[in-house]
Each structure stands twice: as C-alpha cells, then as structure tokens.
Image: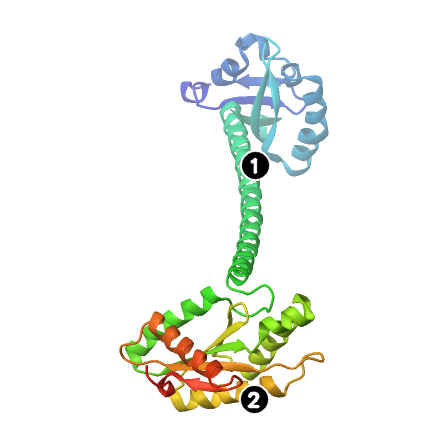
Amino acid sequence: MDIQLDQAPCGYVSISDTGIVRSVNQTFLDMLRYERDGLLGQHIESAMSVTNKLFFHTYFYPYIQLYGHVNEMYFSLRTSAREDVPVLLNGVRQERGGETVIDCVVLEMRKRIEYEKDMLQTKTKLEELYQATKEANEQLERLHGEYESKQQELMRVNDRLEMLASTDPLTGLRNRRFFQDGLLASLAAYRESGEPFSLLLFDIDHFKRINDTYGHPVGDLILIKLAELLRSLSRASDIVARYGGEEFVVLLPETDRAKALLAAERYCEAASSTEMDGYRITVSIGAATVSPEATEVTLVDQADLALYASKSGGRNRVTHFEQVPER
C-alpha cells in the first residue's frame, strides 16, 4: 500500500466477499487502536459489537450484494479496548485480481456527533425559548387586556365619582359647584366670541309653609317634581342645577334678555299649572344677562336682586335685572 493511501485522512479497509480483512491503512488502525497484524486476516466483525454485527448482516451485506455499493451508512466500530467509535462508511463491491472484494472508506464521526448534539441542544433551547416567549407574549396580552379592562372600569368609576360630585343627590340635577364651573366657562366663551348668555334664578314661593304644613317628605317631593319639570322644559345645552334649599338655577347659552324673559315666563307658567302629586306651587324667577363688565359674582347678584323684586312684587312672576327699579 503506497504511503499516500496509508496516511490518508480517512480510514480504508478492504474485505473479502465473506468479510475477511485483506488490507487496511494506518489511519484505520489508529482509529481503532489495532496493530496491522491484529486485523489482517481477521473478520471485520471482530471490530464490532453484537448489535452492530447484526446491523452489518441485516443491512450492509444484502445492500452491497444487491446494488454493489453502500453510501453513508452510519454505525459503530469497536476499538481494541472495546470502546465504540461512531463512523460513516462508504463501500463498493468490485473484482480485483480474480477475487471479489469490498473496498470501504471510513470516516470517524465523533466531531459531527458532538456538533449534532450541540445543534440539537441549541434547537431544544431555541424551542424552549420560543415557547417561553410565546407564553410571555400571551401573558403580556392577558395583562394588557386586564389593564385595558381595569382602565375602562377606572374611567367609569371616575365618571361616576365626577357625576356624584357634581350632582344634587335629592333631585338628580347638577349641583351648585357644577353650575359655577359652567358659569365661568360661559363667561370665558362670551369674552372670546361675544355670544350672549343669561341665567335664571328660581325660588319656590312659600316653601317654608309647605314644609311646616305637610312635612319635609312632601317638601322633598315638590323639589323632585319641580326638578323634573325644569329638566323637561330645558334644552340639552342648558345647565339646570339646584342652587340650594328651594332655589334652582338655569344657565341659558346663546340667550339674550328677550329670549331669557320668554324662557322664564314659560318656566313660571308651567310650574303654576302643573299638579305635583296632588300639590300645586308657584315660583318666582329673577333673570340676568351677561354684559361686558359682568363677572360670575355680579351676574348671580343681579339675578338674585331680580328674584327679590319678583317676590316683593307679589311672587309667581318673572323679573329681569334690567327691570329692577332703583338699582
């Protein structure tokens, strides 16, 4: 055997048709830690485990007899120290010197197996990481959904709290604080656009007499029924609020003096003509319309003065601040 083949970077072994080793290169001997005379003349299966002998008989011999060659057959050989060496084997069956021989090239597979194990471990880790990432994303989506739900719930609670904070608990109308905020906003809009607005201040006539005669439950009933009436007669843009006690207020956007008086007369007439669960009332109303020098304080004061004029003039009537004599 020439030196190039003997020192080739792969193992070479030539066996007879019956499996007897005829020649072998040094690389193959080094791979299995045999001396040359320890393998020459021996059956190739002497370098195999029982399992691999069975594999060799079951696959290698039938295949090479049938097709004349074997490509990339993977199995294990055994060293002189009885250690398994994983190999990849290519074989070809041919005639040489009047004898049928099988020439085999053997590649040791330790590195490849290590690489495959590393790749398998890496693949497993990637799959685990993917699964963990998927689960984390699903958890994140669930948490995001919970966050959105709780945020919506919080907004509803905040809206509810805001409504409670700005609503009169007895009548369900807006309260004094909400009206004052609306008045400030209307003043700011007036100074920017010049669009007039008015406010009406209501007082139930002889309300103390109602409470004293029929009791506070009836007085509360009257307040509730009047609130319902005022709400039914008002526009969506109007702010109808309980100002305190038996006093109510209506803020009328885009309403000048003439329109304010018409609206006030409508409220006054409706109150006197509406039966409230068997009881009848009248209301006195004071009106005021915004002017360039008006403030939130002066407007309420003007409506209050006009209300006082209505009560002094006999009640169940409407008075605009501009109609109040000796102001």
Label 1 packing within 10 angstroms: few (<14), some (14-19), many (20+): few
Residue 269 badge: 2
Mark linked to residue 18: none
Q: Amino acid at mark 2?
A: Glu
Using residue 249 as the reference point, say whether residue 305 is left or right of it.
Answer: left
Q: Is residue 86 above or below residue 129?
A: above
Contact between marks 1 and 2 (CB within 8 A): the answer is no
Q: Look at 62% across and 13% down and name the residue there.
A: 41
Determine if residue 93 is in view.
no
Residue 321 location (% of width, % of height): 38, 83
Task: Report the residue that reaches farthest toward the left.
Answer: 293
| 52 and 166: which is toward the camera | 166
The answer to whether residue 60 shows anywhere in this view is yes
Q: From the top left corner, tell me how far across and down residue 197 is, in percent.
A: 38, 81
Q: State the residue position of label 1.
A: 128
Q: Regarding mark 2 in the picture, which secondary structure is present there?
A: helix
Q: Residue 130: where, in percent of width, then height?
A: 54, 41
Question: Is 147 in front, or is 65?
Answer: 147
Tell me how far mark 1 sits from mark 2, CA to CA: 79 Å
Asked where in the image residue 183 lies, by quadrant, the reply is bottom left
Q: In the image, residue 234 lies at what x, y percent?
A: 53, 82
